Amino acid sequence: NAGVTQTPKFQVLKTGQSMTLQCAQDMNHEYMSWYRQDPGMGLRLIHYSVGAGITDQGEVPNGYNVSRSTTEDFPLRLLSAAPSQTSVYFCATSQGEQYFGPGTRLTVT
Amino acid sequence: QQQVKQSPQSLIVQKGGISIINCAYENTAFDYFPWYQQFPGKGPALLIAIRPDVSEKKEGRFTISFNKSAKQFSLHIMDSQPGDSATYFCAASMRGGSNYKLTFGKGTLLTVNP
């Protein structure tokens, strides 16, 4: 039982490049979400999903896309990376209590 | 508009002392208030949580105090230990259906000196 896994752990992108941050869970939780964490800003919700095929925007959705084709996976896509997207990204799942993954540290130069 | 305000930003406590972190919320529809603990390089982990039908919840050395009329809640860490040094986040959500969306405070960096 791995819980919540995120890949990659670290990534460096150039401005304008695209990439997908992967999140997978084996707890069969319907609710999944993506947060970004910046110094002094806490965790801010980017997108969330209450089940396969259903997604919605959080507090800071601009520049990010998500899809939820299965219960297990919830990838986060950056279509054209910007330096303002330099951050640590956390995926979380919930069926009551939220469980966070280990995070992906992204740097955009 | 920040819906959950957390203070202080940082806190230094001596070993054995009491650490107190405070949060205030604005949305009266919030009905679930968890605290998360985060160590460097790790994801946040649930520490303790409370619902507004009780004024206090204790788990070991950690206690949440909740004041519904003041829209405030706080985390007390008794007999603080160097291993408690971490960043602590309060959060709030409205429970209903399958949506577990959380709104977080900005965090408090706790340092417990030996």
Image (tube, coloured by chain):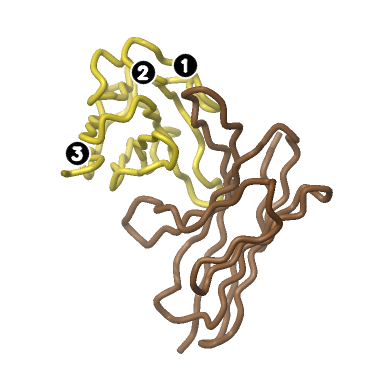
Chain colours: A yellow, B brown
Which amino acid, by three-letter code, is at mark 2?
Gly
Chain ID of residue with mark 1: A
Displayed quadrant of residue B64 = bottom right
Residue B68 position within the rendered picture, expressed as x and y whole percent measured from the top left: 77, 48
Q: Is residue A34 above or below residue B41?
A: above
Residue A20 position within the rendered picture, expressed as x and y whole percent measured from the top left: 24, 25
Quadrant location of the C terminus of chain B in the rendered image: bottom left
Chain-order first, disc 3 or disc 1: 3
Depth check, front residue: A61 or B46: B46
Q: Residue at x 51, y 31 (%)?
A: B101
The residue carrying pointer 1 sits among few (fewer than 14), some (14 to 19) or many (20 or more) residues within 10 Å by Cα, namely few
* Residue named by callout 2: A51
Depth check, front residue: A30 or B25: A30
Look at the numbered disc 1 and give the secondary structure of its residue.
strand
Q: Residue at x 36, y 37 (%)?
A: A92
Which amino acid, by three-letter code, is at mark 3?
Pro
Seen in the image, is A14 located left or right of residue B44?
Answer: left
* Residue named by callout 1: A56
Quadrant location of the N terminus of chain B in the rendered image: top right
Residue B59 position within the rendered picture, expressed as x and y whole percent measured from the top left: 51, 66
Q: Is residue A97 above or below residue B109?
A: above
Task: Work out whether disc 2 and disc 3 sit on a shared chain.
Answer: yes
Q: Residue furthest top?
A: A53
| Circles 2 and 1: CB atoms closer than 8 Å | no
Displayed quadrant of residue B13 = bottom right
Displayed quadrant of residue A93 = top left
